Image (cartoon, rainbow, N blue to C red):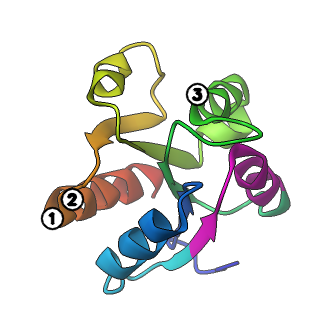
Amino acid sequence: MINKENSYTILIADDDEINRVILKHMLKYVDAEIICVSDGEEVMAFLNENGNSKVILLLDLNMPNMDGNEVIARVNMESSLKSRIRIIVITANLLSAYLKIGMGDSVLECLEKPVNKEELINLIKLGSAQLN
């Protein structure tokens, strides 16, 4: 956990290890701690264990145990989470990108895999600015 006042953690949630490795590599020059998890239950465990952390969550929708849609619903239901988390949905399903409407204010954008590195980094900067 990072304790600096204006710092944030990037949490990558994807059940595909290759996708996690690619995203982590894309973001190696971003000045943030990067944590990887493989399902929604691990996302919620991290968020609950790190109760004061500001988090940019890169979230796959199709994961086992708890999918991305349920994670988004839980974040939107808890104001303590909603205030310190921004979500960027990263999905292989282009139709999911049209579902951003109704996902709530915590979702910045929906991106289709493979993501554009510059677009992703710009969204992370936007999300981190909203959290400061």
N-term mark: 2 or 3: 3
Q: Is residue 38 magenta?
A: yes
Residue depth check, mark 3 versus mark 1: number of the one nearer the observer: 3
In this rendered view, identify the residue nearer to me: 108 or 15: 15
Find disc 2 in the rendering and name its residue: 122
Numbered range of the magenta stretch:
35-48
**Number of numbered markers:** 3
Residues at circles 2 and 1 in contact by the CB criterion of under 8 Å: yes
Please, which residue is most extreme toward the bottom here? Answer: 29
Q: Position of residue 129 (x, y in %)?
A: 35, 56
Q: Is residue 61 magenta?
A: no
In this rendered view, identify the residue nearer to me: 105 or 37: 37
Q: Quadrant of residue 2?
A: bottom right
Q: Residues within 10 Å of mark 3 (few under 14, many from 20)?
A: some
Q: Residue at x 35, y 40 (%)?
A: 92
Q: Position of residue 59 (x, y in %)?
A: 50, 47
Q: Quadrant of the N terminus?
A: bottom right
N-term mark: 3 or 1: 3
Most prominent secondary structure in the magenta stretch?
Answer: helix
> In 3D space, how far apart are the residues under numbered discs 2 and 3 (Cα atoms)?
23 Å
Q: Residues within 10 Å of mark 1 (few under 14, many from 20)?
A: few
At label 1, the amino acid type is: Glu
> In 3D space, how far apart are the residues under numbered discs 2 and 1 (Cα atoms)?
6 Å
Q: Is residue 51 above or below residue 75?
A: below
Q: Residues within 10 Å of mark 2 (few under 14, many from 20)?
A: few
The residue tagged with tag 3: helix, strand or loop? helix
Q: Residue at x 72, y 39 (%)?
A: 80
Find disc 3 in the rendering and name its residue: 69
Residues at circles 2 and 3 in contact by the CB criterion of under 8 Å: no
